[in-house]
Amino acid sequence: MTHRPDPGDAEADRSQEIPLEDEYSRRRFLAYSAAGAVAPFLIEQASAIPGTTPEAAAGVTNFVVQPTPSWYFVHRENGSEEMKWGPVGQAVLAGGAEGYGELTPNDRMYIHNRARPPRIDRRTWRLKLTGDALARPRSFTYDELLAMPHVTLKRTIDCGANCSAFFPKLPPGGADGRWLPVGYTQWHFGAVGAAEWTGVRAKDVLAAAGAESPVDVKFTGLDVIVNRSFPGGTIRYSQVAPADKVLKDDTLLVYGMNGWDLPVDHGYPLRLLLSGWAAVTYVK
């Protein structure tokens, strides 16, 4: 996270990061910065587990950790499991239908992972805040976050590409010449779900680090995404949000979902929640 420098300020190190590491696993989370390079983290990748997806059958590392039975999910691509809807928002189950009520159960919420969640031991995991807008750059243990005042909010999360399978195809454009929406996950209606999220206000965490006149905050996860087009072949998922959004009362760093610890595929042990923004910004 950064502040606006005085005209005479020398160029400062603006990188901020928020690494993590915790046992049962989960990609992780945050790094703050306005211009920011994020320090590299060595993350041990979880080994592939048996699954029902074509990738798993072909011996490809499955990006999804939890079971995704076909009566709950539609497999779209590796890391993308679409929640099934029945009539009027009911789940399709074997031989019948069961209502969701207000909230989507944790084991039925759609999943969108861009990499295999790293192994994380929350006893040694840390949320690290750095940057020139912080008077007291510091890190937080998981227990320290739990000890802070917490907030619980009901929020619906929606993938920005939800319903993309129904978008009209457009003529080729851009450098790659693709026909849109080819190349995007072909979701139907199920890349959306409602849950009760529990966590700490981002502004309280930033205040504890002495945030002074922040401008932008960069959140960087621990997932290692592999792609030949990236410099070095890998990248960590990140998003930048303006400080006025990050400092709102309903912007949380969440560790709970529907009364339980965050599931591995939904950000364990911590993820960002930016109310009103597409779920693509909710860095895990």
Image (spheres, helix red, strand yellow):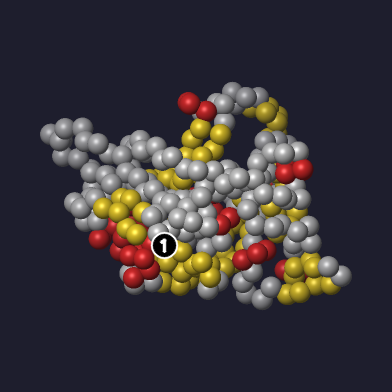
Residue positioned most to the right: 95
Between 256 and 3, which is closer to the camera in this rendering?
256
Q: Position of residue 8 (x, y in %)?
A: 12, 34
- Figure quadrant of residue 140: bottom left
Q: Is residue 60 visible?
A: yes
Q: Residue at x 51, y 66 (%)?
A: 261
Could you tell me the amino acid type at mark 1?
Leu
Between 112 and 189, which is closer to the camera in this rendering?
112
Q: Is residue 248 visible?
A: no
Image position of 183 with respect to 158: above or below: above
- Kindly state the secondary structure of the residue where label 1 is placed: strand
Image position of 140 with respect to 223: above or below: below
User: Going by the image, does 46 lie left or right of 88?
Assistant: left
User: Going by the image, does 62 lie left or right of 262?
Assistant: right
Q: Residue at x 47, y 39 (%)?
A: 236
Q: Residue at x 24, y 56 (%)?
A: 209
Mark 1, residue position:
252
Image position of 195 with respect to 13: above or below: below
Q: Residues within 10 Å of mark 1 (few under 14, many from 20)?
A: many
User: Going by the image, does 204 lie left or right of 228?
Assistant: left
Between 274 and 244, which is closer to the camera in this rendering?
274
Q: Position of residue 244 (x, y in %)?
A: 34, 55
Q: Residue at x 64, y 45 (%)?
A: 48
